[in-house]
Image (cartoon, rainbow, N blue to C red):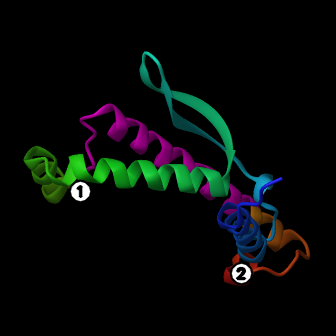
């Protein structure tokens, strides 16, 4: 049996931070994210249910990969700087936008639910509950 400390410690740290910040375990919040899967016929995006930590990591990787195509595109710069809109021209950019929106929606829904529960009853103390 082989132990990979880099991935094991990362998962433990992510789980710890989720518990400290929002007061729930990492697998309590699930997000449906399009994950890039390389197949013999080419790369495809498949919808997968992930924990928040996994979804943040996947969305971050996609955003960083799409940054190179976005910022070098003069049309994207013009639209983004004049309107603030983040247009997607490539498949990766489109899925990156969709995933970021799904992640924001899942987190907003969770925070609103926690906020309403904090007002109605005694809850566990965590950073999120202290902000309410």
Range of the magenta residues?
84-113
Query: Residue under circle 2?
Result: 127
Residue displayed at 56% across by 50% down: 103
Q: Position of residue 39 (x, y in %)?
A: 49, 22
Within-10-Å neighbours for mark 1: few <14, some 14–19, many 20+: few
Q: Nearer the viewer, residue 17 or 88?
A: 17
Element at label 2: helix
Outermost residue toward the top? 41
Element at label 1: loop
Q: Position of residue 75 (x, y in %)?
A: 10, 44
Q: Nearer the viewer, residue 56 or 106?
A: 56
In this rendering, is residue 79 above or below 114?
above
| Alpha carbons under labels 1 and 2: distance apart | 31 Å
Residue displayed at 42% across by 48% down: 62
Relative horizontal placement of residue 37, taking residue 6 as reference (left or right): left
Q: Considering the image in quadrants, where does the C terminus appear? A: bottom right
In this rendering, is residue 79 above or below 49?
below
Indicate which disc residue 84 carries: 1
Within-10-Å neighbours for mark 2: few <14, some 14–19, many 20+: some
Q: Position of residue 119 (x, y in %)?
A: 80, 73
Residue displayed at 49% across by 50% down: 59
């Amino acid at each position: 049996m082989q132990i990979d400390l880099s991935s094991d410690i990362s998962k433990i740290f992510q789980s710890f931070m989720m518990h400290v910040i929002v007061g729930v375990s990492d697998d309590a919040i699930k997000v449906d994210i399009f994950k890039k899967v390389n197949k013999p016929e080419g790369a495809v995006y498949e919808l997968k249910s992930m924990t928040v930590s996994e979804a943040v990591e996947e969305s971050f990787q996609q955003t960083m990969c799409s940054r190179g195509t976005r910022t070098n595109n003069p049309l994207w710069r013009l639209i983004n700087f004049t309107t603030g809109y983040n247009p997607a021209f490539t498949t990766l950019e489109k899925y990156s936008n969709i995933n970021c929106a799904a992640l924001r929606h899942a987190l907003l829904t969770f925070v609103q639910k926690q906020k309403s529960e904090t007002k109605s009853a005694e809850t566990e103390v965590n950073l999120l509950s202290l902000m309410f």
